[in-house]
Image (cartoon, rainbow, N blue to C red):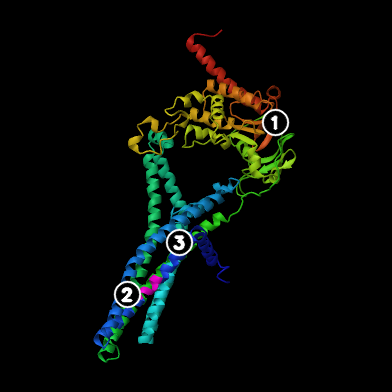
């Protein structure tokens, strides 16, 4: 297999491509300075030899001055080179980091579905691809390779010097460096494997850390006294990670110690040989200087070569995660079919779905039609498949079997981006964005980002306008306290936290920005609201849904009774469907659920009447 087609060759090509596209001029200058740095020690050694031999010989003053000047200039270049190289490396770091990050998240943005975000192995790859922030593995790999190239040039220069003085000693020094190179490569592979294996451990550690440090979990943790439980679990995961790293570090210490002993033995033996050769006149003082510097230089350069090659090798292995994410391709089949305005309706034909072959079926042969302009309500117990059906309608997943049709065309044949442009939604697990109130609403339709009047109208329909208008900076107030120092968080003008019900209304306002879309999906749109607010919101939603195709999911059956048709899901199947009145008359699952909820309200009313002395 050639290097170009081998895994290492492909990784190297990716790293080189990133550097070339990010900063071609900087890369070229960095390479030139690296090669210059490789030759400076060899040049300085030979200039020193010539100067020493000239001093004890018959060299003219002019010749000595020339050698001295050349040696001084070499020293000046050697002193300036590291600083210039450090700057160029930092610039490459910044530019490659920017390009690599953008490329990574452009690929993530291209994942049209949700499956990869629910895959722990893929999330580990994504985390490792993100790791090191502004210093991506591509840059580390290039830096290691350039360092290895510099060391290789230095090795060749000093080996040439040794060959002139003693070919056998050159062979001994070179052979002694081979174990170091092999050991470093093996150690780098072990460390890269360790980082991959620790992915789940570190993810659990971060999970427990987030639980202990975020406001979402703070109330329950303090009320139930579970802080110690989570802290001990987090500490256990940290100990597991530390043990794995400790094992790798100990292996490296043992290996590096043995290699250092080998290098010392070779260096000591070579020095004894040089001293003996000098006493017999076989070597001049300059030759001895070259020999000592060459042995030390070869050993140092070989050690550097091994370390840099190992670093590059490890970085290239870890670059696999970046390559895996950026080359993963679409997670759902991408089509380019036009998505016309909905005219007939949406139909589910024998839709079966499960999240993987190892999971149970969530939907089992669902046949369903949502006529254009009608309001359909989905009800059922938890786990019946309601939210999964919503994910399929938004094409976050494709059916395992069967098809979903938009005016008779399979969703898989339509452009997914254009399909979603025709859908508005409020999800049960809606987002809290740490942005301004203005931006939180505008995210529902970025075309409205600069349309203040439209944003305020959406907020008014969601019943949140007055609250947002009273904020310290009105709609421009940040709905978060996370971007400020602790000393600034006491100032309410630095950010405001909304209540759960207020956030629900902000999410509804986002949806109202898209109320002109062909399909409106409302998944528990009033779950966090009180009874009065729920009535107000559903009244507004009824006006928004008039004449439009909508799907409403709610556990509160009173909120769906005015839907054109109600579908009851049970164990992934359509158990029954019809109008509210028809389903009550059938006395089936819907009637039983409605009766249970109504009984709960009647019981509450009876209790209230008894407490107040009312009743008939």
Q: Position of residue 149 (x, y in %)?
A: 44, 71
On screen, 455 above or below 240?
above
Q: Nearer the viewer, residue 78 or 304?
A: 78
Which residue is drawn at the image coordinates 52% and 28% (left, top)? 505
Label 3 residue SS = helix
Q: State which tag comes first along the sequence, 2 or 3.
A: 3
On screen, 387 above or below 135?
above
Q: Residues within 10 Å of mark 3 (few under 14, many from 20)?
A: some
Q: Position of residue 512 (x, y in %)?
A: 59, 30
Residue named by callout 1:
576
Residue named by callout 2:
261
Q: Quadrant of the N terminus?
A: bottom right
Q: Are marks 2 and 3 in contact (CB under 8 Å)?
A: no
Q: How many marks?
A: 3
Name the mark on residue 26: 3
On screen, 549 above or below 316?
above
Confirm whether residue 561 shows in the render. Answer: yes
Q: Residues within 10 Å of mark 2 (few under 14, many from 20)?
A: few
Bounds of the magenta segment:
36-41
Q: State which tag comes first along the sequence, 1 or 2.
A: 2
Prevalent SS, magenta region: helix
Which residue is drawn at the image coordinates 56% and 47% (left, top)? 109
């Amino acid at each position: 297999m050639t290097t170009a087609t081998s895994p290492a060759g492909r990784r190297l090509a990716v790293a080189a491509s990133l550097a070339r596209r990010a900063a071609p001029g900087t890369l070229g200058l960095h390479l030139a300075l690296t090669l210059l740095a490789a030759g400076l020690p060899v040049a300085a050694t030979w200039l020193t030899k010539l100067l020493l031999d000239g001093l004890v010989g018959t060299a003219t003053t002019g010749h000595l001055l020339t050698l001295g000047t050349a040696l001084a200039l070499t020293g000046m270049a050697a002193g300036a080179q590291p600083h210039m190289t450090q700057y160029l490396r930092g610039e490459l770091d910044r530019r490659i980091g920017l390009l690599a990050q953008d490329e990574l998240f452009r690929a993530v943005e291209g994942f049209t579905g949700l499956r990869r975000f629910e895959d722990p192995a893929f999330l580990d790859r994504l985390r490792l691809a993100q790791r090191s922030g502004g210093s991506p593995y591509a840059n580390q790999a290039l830096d290691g390779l350039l360092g290895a190239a510099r060391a290789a040039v230095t090795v060749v220069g000093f080996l040439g010097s040794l060959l002139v003085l003693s070919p056998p000693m050159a062979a001994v020094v070179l052979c002694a460096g081979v174990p170091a190179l092999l050991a470093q490569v093996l150690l780098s592979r072990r460390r890269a494997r360790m980082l991959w294996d620790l992915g789940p451990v570190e993810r659990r550690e971060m999970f427990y850390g987030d639980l202990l440090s975020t406001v979402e979990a703070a109330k329950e943790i303090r009320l139930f006294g579970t802080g110690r439980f989570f802290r001990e679990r987090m500490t256990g995961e940290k100990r597991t990670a530390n043990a794995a790293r400790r094992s790798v570090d100990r292996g490296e210490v043992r290996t590096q110690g043995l290699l250092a002993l080998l290098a010392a033995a070779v260096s000591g033996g070579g020095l004894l040989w040089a001293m003996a050769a000098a006493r017999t006149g076989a070597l001049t003082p300059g030759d001895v200087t070259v020999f000592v510097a060459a042995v030390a230089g070869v050993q140092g350069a070989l050690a550097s070569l091994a370390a840099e090659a190992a670093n590059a090798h490890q970085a290239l292995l870890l670059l696999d995660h970046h390559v895996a994410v950026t080359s993963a391709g679409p997670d759902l089949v991408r089509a380019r079919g036009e998505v016309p305005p909905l005219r007939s309706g949406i139909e589910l034909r024998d839709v079966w779905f499960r999240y993987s072959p190892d999971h149970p079926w969530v939907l089992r042969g669902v046949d369903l039609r949502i006529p254009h302009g009608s309001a359909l309500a989905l009800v059922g117990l938890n786990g019946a498949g309601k939210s999964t059906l919503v994910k399929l309608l938004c094409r976050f997943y494709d059916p395992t079997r069967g098809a979903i049709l938009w005016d008779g065309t399979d969703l898989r044949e339509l452009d997914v981006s254009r399909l979603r442009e025709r859908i508005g939604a409020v999800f049960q697990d809606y987002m809290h964005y740490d942005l301004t109130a203005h931006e939180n609403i505008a995210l529902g339709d970025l075309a409205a980002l600069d349309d203040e009047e439209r944003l305020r109208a959406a907020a008014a329909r969601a019943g949140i306008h007055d609250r947002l208008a009273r904020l310290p900076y009105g709609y421009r107030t940040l709905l978060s306290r996370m971007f400020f120092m602790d000393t600034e968080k006491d100032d309410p003008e630095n950010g405001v936290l909304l209540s759960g019900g207020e956030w629900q209304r902000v999410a509804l306002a986002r949806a109202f920005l898209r109320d002109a879309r062909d399909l409106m999906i409302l998944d528990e749109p009033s779950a966090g609201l009180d009874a009065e607010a729920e009535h107000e919101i559903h009244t507004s939603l009824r006006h928004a849904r008039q004449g439009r195709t909508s799907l409403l999911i709610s556990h509160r059956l009173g909120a769906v009774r005015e839907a054109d048709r109600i579908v009851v899901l049970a164990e992934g199947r359509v158990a029954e469907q019809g109008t509210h009145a028809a389903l009550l008359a059938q006395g089936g699952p819907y009637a039983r659920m409605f009766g249970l909820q109504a009984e709960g309200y009647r019981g509450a009313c009876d209790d209230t009447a008894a407490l107040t002395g009312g009743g008939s």
